[in-house]
Image (cartoon, rainbow, N blue to C red):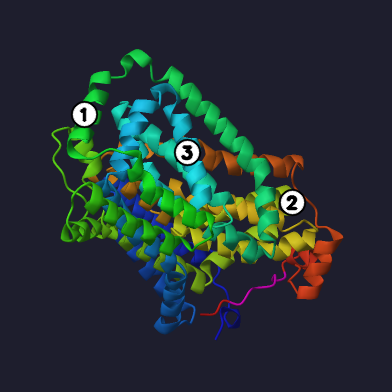
Amino acid sequence: MTLTDRALPSLPLALTPVLLTLLVLGLQLFYFGDFTPHVPLAIGLAITGLVGLKLGFNWHDIEKGVFHVIHVSLPSVSVLITVGMIIGVWIASGTVPTLIYYGLTILSPQIFLAAAMILCAIVSVSLGTSWGTVGTVGLALMGIGAGFDIPMYWTAGAVVSGAFFGDKISPLSDTTNLAPAVTGTNLFSHIRNMMPTTVPAMLIAFAIYLFAGFAVIEGGDVSFARINAITTSLQEHFVISPWLLLPALLVIVLAVKRMPPIPSLFAGVVAGGITAMLAQGEGLHAIFTYANSGYSIDTGVDAMDNLLNRGGIQSMMWTISLVLIALGFGGALERTGCLETIIQVIMTKIRSFAGIQTAAIGTSMATNLVAGDPYLSIALPGRMYAPVYRGMGYSTLNLSRAIEEGGTLISPLIPWNAGGAFVISALALGVASGNMENLLYIPLSFACWLSPVLGIIYAFTGLFSPKATEEEIQGWKESGEAIADLDAAWTGEEAPRPAVTG
């Protein structure tokens, strides 16, 4: 049986699990001051299950929705596991220490933030994965920033801006392929259509980071004694050489050759393990330990110990458990029709292109916020809004850009979202340990939130908002795509509903 065989919940009933979950989350995060959103999200899943039972679903129906979304997102969980291994092994191999060493000796503190954003953007476009970029190059940049005595949240903001920019426009990225797939657009047309928001957002972010580097970080305030202590400690405990960057280079080459992300990243694990044995004298069993439990060292320099003692599969379990629970909650909301009801109500109230474009971006953001899943935040609004764009005569390229910006780019800015949880864990921001000030990386990830803001401005001004071409309209008709009867929708009749099976 499909979801279209059942009545959608009323708006008050659909909002019940969303509002109650946000209430419990707020209680946990702000009243108790405990940044562990796992149980509140699990309670949200249970509340959604009760709503589903009231609507006539049995537990098997709801369970299928929960596990369907989890199954779709398992490749991302696999990336988390592989990145955990890479972090531990690349520290042991000297790859991360070498990146930190040369970064401290070559980069100027004043240009560091701007350079960090650009470097992460280049690597992310090459790899097609923001998570892989954050967990490898991003981790090394956090070490360089610590050496320059730059606050962690500034460095994290620059890393996130660059890494998720690459994820947004790389043809190797899963989310970049998902957005045009659910809206029926061409991949490379989708990427081209994102440039009017992406390029200005990156240029503005670059200018802000450059200004911050000179205005916030005075050259005289940089502790060169601290930098010397770090670089000396790295030389004492690791062999430092440009050759040790080969594992990172291998992963980039494989990505450029369009190898799948997980095998490419795992090749980096193997290359890092071999490098650790040959260059640093590590044993095979030690490599296995670093890949599973993370690297451990006592350099005598607290800043370095805090950075280097990390990695391994087990370090990702907090994030993975949060991701799985959040995905389950999102799957239950989708299966019971709660999210669909909310979107249907929005679609009956909005009668302009600017309104529908803003609503599509906002819905993707809200789905990210409530469901904690970047994939669902792209797939669900993409399926629901596409007929409306066709009915208005606008190209669905506008929609694919909207859901990419509200989905991919906002994901790392929500701490309990899969993207935000990974950023906090991989960059060792220590939010769960009470370092709440590091959540300032959210407003400082300028490129991530500037891009959707520019998208909304374009929608209201008509700039970069293409109408559907005759060729596109003909393609809709030939492929049997749904085209909303907007007159019917605005007079209160039910809009076409996509079937949800699984």
- Please say whether residue 163 is one of the residues in the magenta stretch: no
Measure the C-alpha gap from mark 3 to mark 2.
Answer: 36 Å
Q: Quadrant of residue 113?
A: top left
Which quarter of the image is occupied by the N terminus? bottom right
Q: Quadrant of residue 146?
A: top left
The residue range painted magenta reads 493-499
**Residue 371 vs residue 107, the one in the foreground:** 107
On residue 246, the disc is none
Compared with 256, 59 (above or below) is: below
Secondary structure at badge 1 equals: helix
Asked whether the viewer can see residue 261, the reply is yes
Which numbered disc, 1 or 2, marks the residue that appears first in the sequence?
Answer: 1
Coordinates of residue 242 in the picture (x, y in percent): 35, 39
Coordinates of residue 420 in the picture (x, y in percent): 40, 50
Measure the C-alpha gap from mark 1 to mark 2.
Answer: 59 Å
**Residue 486 vs residue 406, the one in the foreground:** 406
Residue 163 shown left or right of residue 404 in the figure: left
Secondary structure at badge 2 equals: helix
On residue 353, the disc is 2
Judging by the rendered image, the residue that carries numbered circle 3 is 119
Q: Residue at x 31, y 19 (%)?
A: 222
Kind of residue sitting beneath label 3: Leu
Q: Residue at x 50, y 67 (%)?
A: 13
